[in-house]
Amino acid sequence: MSSTEQTSRPSRLAAAAGVALVEALGLLAGGLYVLVRTVAGDGGDLTGGTTAGVTLVALGLIPLAAALGLWRSRSWSRGPAVITQILALPVAWQLLQTEGFIPFGIVLAVLSVTGLVLLVNPATTEALGIRGPGRREG
């Protein structure tokens, strides 16, 4: 990476990429965990466990791609990142309602809200080249 790229990326954009990366790693790790438990015979239903594991891994690829895009200042990456944050909020709420999963719910809620705040920040949208409604170039 050149020094111009490094200095042109605002810290909020880098932080948003970091949030998306943490969420991606969580989904990927969770999916792999479910798959390993299923294959080892601890997960119960083979079909259901495999489906759940593969689904989590596939869903983890979305914020992973968004994190990479945000890090590279690609405007397309904001959409998947915002959608990931919005979809994570009801998941966090469900985790907060389930005994034993409350700490995970707190972490996910904080990540989601932080990610949303960072992604709608004017410095982030400007760095991604996203113009507001009714704004013209030049």
Image: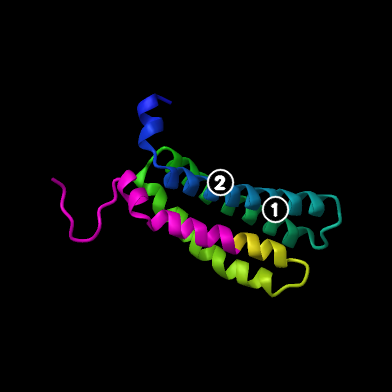
Category of crowding for the residue at label 2, using alpha-carbon neighbours closer than 10 angstroms: few (below 14), some (14–19), many (at least 20): many
Q: Which of 45 and 112 is in front in this view?
A: 112
Query: Disc 1 and disc 2: Cα gap in Å?
Result: 14 Å
Residue 20, magenta (yes or no): no
Q: What segment is highlighted magenta in the picture?
A: 109-138
Side (left or right) of 84 relative to 10: right
Residue at 65% in and 72% down: 94
Marker count (numbered): 2
Instruction: State the residue position of label 1.
Output: 30
Outermost residue to the right: 41
Check disc 2 and give the amino acid type: Leu
124 to 87, vertically: above or below? above
Depth check, front residue: 88 or 121: 121
Looking at the rendered image, the quarter that the C terminus falls into is top left
Q: Is residue 58 left or right of residue 95?
A: left
Identify the residue shown where x is 66% and y is 65%: 105
Which residue position holds label 2? 21
Give amino acid for label 1: Gly
